[in-house]
Image (spheres, rainbow, N blue to C red):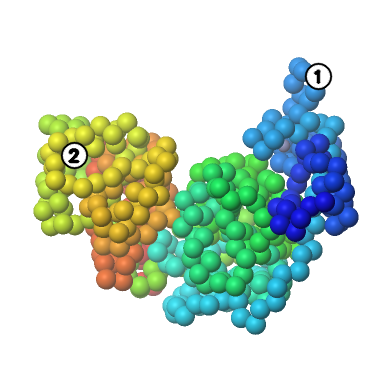
Amino acid sequence: MLSMKNINEFLGGRIFNLAELEQSELEDLISLGSQIVSATFKKNNKLFCRRCLMEIRKLPIEFQYCRNCINLGKIKVNDRLVITPTDVKYPIQSNYLVWDGQLTTNQQKGVRELLRAFDKKQDHLVWAVTGAGKTEMIFPLIEQALFKQQRVAICSPRVDVCIELFPRIQQVFPNTSVGLFHGKSEENYHLTQIMLATVHQLIRFEQAFDVLIIDEVDSYPLAGNKMLHQAITKAKDNQGMIVYLSATPPKELLIAVSKHQVTLTKLYQRFHGHPLPEPRCHLLLKQLEFLGINPRLRSKLTQLIKNGQRFMLFFPQIPIMKSFAEKLHKLYPLLNFVTVSSKDQHRLEKVQQFREQKVQAILTTTILERGVTFKKITVIVLAAQAKEFSKTSLIQIAGRAGRGKDSYDDEVHFYYQYYNDQIRLACAEIDYLNRQAKS
Ligand SMILES: [Zn+2]
């Protein structure tokens, strides 16, 4: 028999491979209303996996299996899946949201539009410039869902975004169960009324959430990933809704808006009412590391360091960052700085050190292009012409600056060897958004 604690690790629209369950677990899950289904289904003469909804292509081996979702455990074509029930009774509270912040007029309009979409079970996109305060806008929406005894998932393709959001959500919904689950989390999945997770985790769910909020919908690895996009739709309850949040929404989503499949809220203004900092562009005639650090850049760095101004340096690749870090250390031995990348296990602690002003500078790849908020910083992109810096990426990076009410005019600098489309388009879009905010 499963204990209550263990049952919670199974419930809530989870998909299991029957072959991996013990007989007693299976009996318990069936008695609680789980369904048993075939692991595959046929459509147009093709075979598909029920868990990840991708096509299973035939391999020249005896036992065919789904290679698409193999990371979550092997599903063979003759396997059966167990899908656990979602009809859970959550504790009723008289008050769910504990938050005394103020929403701006623009945010209030966004909230009204979100709640209207919620009533209609209508998928909705919030297109909000960086620093517009989109997280606060979802609080009233989540509150409504909780009042209706519904279940909410807040997901992002980026684990850092989930980790940043988790304490904020816990804080404003202090008496609601909130879980954070991702590939690297130490916590095992268990049923909670609010779930924060990477989009990948949704592959393990079917019709599980009434409100599914996808933050940073345009970011890697969700952008253009069919399996993850299908996982989102599959994890949503038939009677539910999806909310997409983005400062730089992908084309497909804007097409869905134009076809009225998705409704839209636009927020051009930051919460403090000041415009987005416009990047200043600098052509470096010589290499970045010319004479150690290119003199044009060096004079800027010297000035920042002398003034005790905190700064972020963005690099297109880890090796370029590492090499630059050595030069930086040689030229400014007294400067305290950290470097972070996706490969860095201590990334979160280092980001915290920068936030707490224990170091003056942070050198980073695009891993910190979004989801992080610092105040009073100068943002510098090096080798802005590199292919790793897409237009979207440059807009997001520039959006790290000017987030504080008292430092809305933080500087943003793009340094490059040559000017190209992505730099031009990013600057043009920031300018456009600022003009829209004024009108
Ligand atoms: Zn699969």
Q: Is residue 422 left or right of residue 27?
A: left
Residue at left offset 67%, top offset 38% = 72
Q: Position of residue 144 (x, y in %)?
A: 64, 75
Q: Are marks 2 and 1 in contact (CB under 8 Å)?
A: no
Give the quarter the ligand 1 occupies: top right
- Residue that badge 1 annotates: 62
- Residue 328: which numbered mark, if any? 2
Q: Position of residue 343 (x, y in %)?
A: 42, 37
Residue at left offset 55%, top offset 72% = 174
Q: Position of residue 93 (x, y in %)?
A: 66, 78
- Residue 70: which numbered mark, if any? none
Q: Is residue 143 left or right of residue 327?
A: right
Q: Nearer the viewer, residue 214 or 356?
A: 356
Q: Residues within 10 Å of mark 1 (few under 14, many from 20)?
A: few
Res 393 visible: yes
Q: Give the quarter of the image for residue 141.
A: bottom right
Q: Nearer the viewer, residue 23 or 362?
A: 23
Q: Position of residue 49 (x, y in %)?
A: 76, 37
Residue at left offset 16%, top offset 57% = 308
Q: Is residue 76 left or right of residue 365?
A: right
